[in-house]
């Protein structure tokens, strides 16, 4: 046990080094981690490390899905709901069908049921990589929102296909009507269970006096409860976590205290970063064990199968996204759509962003070794190897070329008339103006006699004037220089306050805990000033 723990400590150190390197060369860290995992797999210390599919699906998947749902904008999700659902369900199903017939045609002895099993495994894209790359190259927000929204739902549809195909391989029977009705039942009940569990946790957070440290721990317990409750009744645990996570995300302001929101954001960011890093690194580490399990099939033959299926996968997704764009244009004549003229550039980018990842590998690893006591599962090792090749090809090749494609197409970000900086200044201006109106209305009589309220009003008047001037097209250079000098002086003042805290640290009169508290307050104030000066 101690040896395994030390190995994972080394892996975390490797993750930190590789991610730092990825930031330096400005590449998405999932690509570097997979390549780094491949390199580490040739070292004897890590050559025997394997992924337990049960660990991935139950320990890693629920919190990663929950965090993704928590960070997803419900406003954007609802705006692009038709596009997201079309990519998460029809496109995944079409892709699984194409891969089923293609693999059945090119692999000798491969049955159609095994083809659907492989299609269900490799049909869902991994949007962690895609969204990371898109954010790095400042891709249009609509594309990022659609990719992230798709990632919340496509895992569910693919795993349901995988479940039915696996049953067909084991039993030798498949009933289309029964599978279709079961599909919709699994989706509906998984969603309802997630919402029900989410409402229970919302009630606990909302109405019970829970301290922040307990609330943060509860946020980690929540996705596991959602996932297990749905899977226990053989429904979609993925959709349960997604639906419940979206519900609680929309209620975060009502159910969590300000301390819990601040602290949980920091805790979740760090833990999810380590989890994602471990998953992508472990994907790369699987190569030696997967090659050893190929048996009679040569590595070159299996590699050719993997590359051919990868190409078909990419082509199918691109054709589907372009087809969805054409269908949207047609339907805009009859119904209201978010964008009646999506064009071909955005769909092409979304099609190329279909990189595969952890869910595909975990699903492949979860294939049982035996159908019965005496019969092994057919082509299990080949399916594992093809899945690995697909992940490697799509993640590395498409991941490296996606930024080039985005820059080459020069897709304009016309989601909003205002840039992020302008939106931020406008919000701050509105907040300052609203605060002034509130103070004047609430303290109209006593405001002049209360020095503290007068000072507070003066502060918001100054902020309102500042942001109002910042939003003007022709800003006075003198104003800009004055604000720059103000920010520089304020930051120097905060450093001076830190120096004072360092001095009084040695004074027995003050507790260290209190000094740390004021250090934190100064840090928050510095963050606010630096955000304003961007």
Image: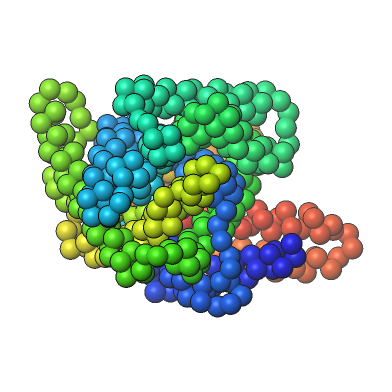
Residue at 23% across / 45% down in the picture?
101
Residue 109, given in percent of the width and then of the height, sits at 30, 51
Front-lying residue, 36 or 76: 36
Quarter where residue 14 is shown: bottom right
Give the residue at x 40% y 53%.
379
Q: Is residue 141 visible?
A: no
Q: Residue at x 24, y 65 (%)?
A: 404
- Position of residue 479 measured from the top left corner of the image (x, y, whole percent): 36, 59
Look at the picture and state if 485 lies above or below 459: below
Q: In the image, is residue 100 above or below residue 188? A: below
Report whether residue 178 is seen. Answer: yes
Give the residue at x 40% y 39%.
Answer: 169
Q: Is residue 267 left or right of residue 434?
A: right
View extreme (right): residue: 508
Q: Nearer the viewer, residue 263 or 486?
A: 263
Looking at the figure, which quarter contains the C terminus? Answer: bottom left
**253, 170: nearer the viewer:** 170
């Amino acid at each position: 046990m101690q040896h395994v723990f030390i190995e994972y400590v080394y892996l975390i150190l490797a993750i930190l080094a590789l991610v730092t390197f990825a930031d330096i060369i400005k590449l998405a860290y999932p690509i570097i981690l997979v390549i780094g995992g491949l390199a580490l797999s040739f070292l004897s210390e890590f050559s025997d490390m394997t992924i337990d599919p049960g660990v991935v699906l139950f320990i890693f998947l629920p919190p990663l899905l929950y965090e993704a749902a928590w960070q997803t904008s419900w406003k954007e999700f609802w705006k692009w709901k038709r596009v997201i659902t079309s990519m998460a369900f029809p496109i995944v199903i079409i892709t699984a069908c194409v891969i089923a017939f293609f693999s059945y045609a090119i692999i000798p002895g491969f049955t159609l049921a095994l083809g659907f099993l492989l299609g269900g495994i490799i049909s869902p894209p991994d949007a962690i990589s895609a969204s990371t790359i898109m954010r790095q190259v400042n891709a249009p927000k609509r594309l990022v929102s659609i990719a992230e929204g798709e990632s919340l739902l496509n895992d569910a549809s693919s795993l349901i296909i995988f479940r039915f195909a696996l049953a067909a391989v084991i039993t030798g029977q498949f009933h289309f009507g029964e599978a279709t009705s079961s599909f919709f039942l699994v989706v509906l009940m998984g969603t309802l269970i997630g919402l029900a569990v989410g409402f229970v946790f919302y009630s606990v957070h909302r109405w019970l006096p829970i301290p922040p440290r307990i609330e943060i721990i509860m946020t980690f317990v929540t996705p596991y409860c959602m996932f297990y409750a749905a899977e226990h009744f053989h429904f979609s645990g993925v959709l349960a976590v997604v639906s419940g996570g979206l519900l609680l995300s929309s209620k975060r302001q009502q159910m969590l205290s300000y301390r819990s929101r601040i602290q949980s954001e920091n805790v979740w960011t760090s833990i999810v970063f380590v989890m994602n890093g471990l998953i992508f690194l472990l994907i790369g580490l699987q190569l030696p064990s997967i090659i050893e399990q190929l048996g009679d099939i040569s590595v070159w033959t299996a590699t050719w199968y993997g590359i051919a299926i990868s190409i078909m996968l990419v082509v199918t997704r691109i054709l589907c996204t372009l087809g969805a764009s054409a269908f949207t244009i047609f339907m805009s004549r009859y119904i209201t759509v978010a964008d009646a003229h999506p064009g071909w550039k955005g769909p092409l980018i979304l099609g190329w962003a279909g990189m595969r990842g952890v869910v595909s590998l975990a699903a492949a690893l979860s294939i049982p070794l035996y159908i019965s006591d005496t019969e092994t599962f057919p082509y299990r090792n080949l399916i594992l190897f093809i899945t690995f090749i697909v992940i490697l090809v799509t993640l590395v090749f498409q991941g490296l070329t996606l930024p080039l494609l985005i820059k080459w197409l020069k897709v304009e970000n016309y989601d909003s008339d205002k840039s992020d900086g302008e939106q931020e200044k406008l919000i701050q201006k509105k907040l300052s103006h609203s605060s002034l109106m509130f103070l004047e209305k609430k303290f109209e009589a006593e405001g002049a006699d209360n020095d503290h309220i007068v000072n507070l009003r003066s502060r918001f008047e100054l902020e309102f004037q500042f942001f109002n001037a910042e939003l003007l097209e022709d800003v006075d250079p003198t104003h800009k220089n004055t604000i720059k000098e103000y920010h520089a002086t304020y930051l120097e003042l905060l450093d001076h306050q830190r120096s004072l805290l360092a001095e009084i640290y040695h004074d027995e009169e003050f507790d260290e805990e209190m000094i740390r508290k004021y250090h934190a307050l100064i840090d928050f104030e510095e963050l606010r000033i630096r955000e304003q000066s961007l």
